[in-house]
Image (cartoon, rainbow, N blue to C red):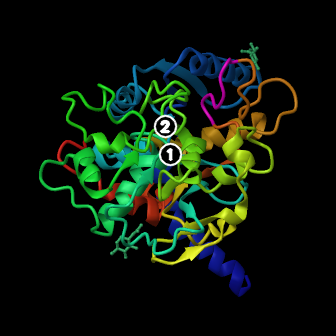
Amino acid sequence: MDRLERRLTVAFLLLLPLLSISCAAHQKTTVSWCVLSDAEEQKCLDLAGNATARNIRGTLECVRGEDTKDCLDKIKDGKADAASMFADDIYAAGLCHGLELAAGESHNGEDGYSYYVVAMARRSSSDLSLLEMHERSSCHPGIRTTVGWTVPIGYLVNTSQISIGEQCNFPRAVGNFFGYSCVPGVKDVQHDPKGNNPKNLCEACIGDDNDRHICANNPRERHYGESGALRCVAENLGDVAFVKHSTIFDNLDGKNQESWALDLEQEDLKLLCPDGTEANLDEFEHCHLAAVPANAVVVRVEDKCRVWKFLERLQNAFGNANEGFRLFSSAGYGKSNVLFDDDTHHLQRVLGSYTSWLGPTYTTVLQAFECEGFC
Ligand SMILES: *[C@@H]1O[C@H](CO)[C@@H](O)[C@H](O)[C@H]1NC(C)=O
Ligand SMILES: *[C@@H]1O[C@H](CO)[C@@H](O)[C@H](O)[C@H]1NC(C)=O
């Protein structure tokens, strides 16, 4: 045996007990997937049928959950084994339910990031720094969205610009901090049951052509969503918009035919970076508030290996199929992103903990929300 071979053998012998603990051969062979809609249930059943038809080892079952929280409870209680979840829910799954991840989506074929959250401003706004946003005006795609709420508010709490206090009343703290804003949906009864959320969180909203639906959590509010938040800054109502790095490129060069977008040029805007500096729009990889991870498959800790092995067999059979069942396509189910994101290039194994998948910037901003009642 040469040195390398010997080292590999030793490494293998050291790893053997670990492997057998986490992926024992005698474990059960059924994986039950928690699904939330008719579309998900149908795709799950089609996948199960096709896997059986192709003699893939293991059996897929589909269990219907009422909502994400119900799926988390079912997985924890052993009534389901796995479900695909998006970033905010993964944090709750790990922190509040002690669950972990078996696999995650890669969209670019290299890493597990889905997009960057950036702070965008007009280039002509001088004197603007992300470290001093007090009394400024802000445009957010929507209440309780990752890009428009979780990440920017988490960043402002982490940098001690916003203090949440003992009441854990985030809208009030945000309303006290900014001069005025557009946070579509912030006055909706489901997000504001007592009607106390500050009015200034809707003052940069414009509603529809007839001044109706102001602050609505839907496209009738013309400052709703990522392109609406961009419009809010382009039209000079807000100093800063919290959007995805890709939002600007989706609205330039005639891709958006509305007049505000046709007038817009890349040179008119800039990014504000977390260290207080600014950057060009294409420098989002080093000037962002957080890198948001793609969806991942939540499981019990002891199932990490078993569920990954099963998913690996499914993706080998159906991941790049040109005909028949296709794992990363939602065609025929009446919706997009059913079970997995349609942009998924492949599923990658998650060996580390759920926080390793969420990544340092995103985990930090989420920590700001660990207030009373989070779990
Ligand atoms: C395989 O998947 C297709 C949809 O792609 C579905 O129509 C078909 O019924 C599935 N086959 C089995 C045996 O479930
Ligand atoms: C959170 O705050 C700490 C200390 O101020 C800082 O070092 C870290 O970069 C911040 N994290 C994010 C995601 O902004």
User: In the image, is residue 154 above or below residue 142?
Assistant: below
Q: Are marks 1 and 2 in contact (CB under 8 Å)?
A: yes
Tell me if residue 337 is in the magenta stretch: yes
Furthest-bottom residue in this view: 3
Please give the range of residues in magenta: 333-340
- When asked about the image quadrant of residue 109, the answer is bottom right
Q: Amino acid at mark 1?
A: Ala
What residue do we see at 15% from left, 56% from top? 165
- Mark 2 is surrounded, within 10 Å at the Cα level, by few (under 14), some (14 to 19) or many (20 or more) other residues, namely few
Distance Cα–Cα, label 1 vs label 2:
6 Å
Q: Which mark is residue 235?
A: none
- For the C terminus, give its image quadrant: top left
- The residue at the point 53 percent across, 65 percent down is 288
Residue at (70, 60) in percent of width and height: 110
* Quadrant of the rendered image holding ligand 1: top right
Is 262 left, or right, of 111 in this rendering?
A: right
Secondary element at tag 2: loop
Quick check: 329 left or right of 169? right
Residue 85 in the image: state x and y as whole percent. 49, 38
Amino acid type, callout 2:
Gln
Residue occupied by mark 2 = 27
* Residue 350 shows up from this direction: no
Q: Is residue 336 above or below residue 127?
A: above
Q: Nearer the viewer, residue 158 or 305?
A: 158
Residue 115 in the image: state x and y as whole percent: 60, 54
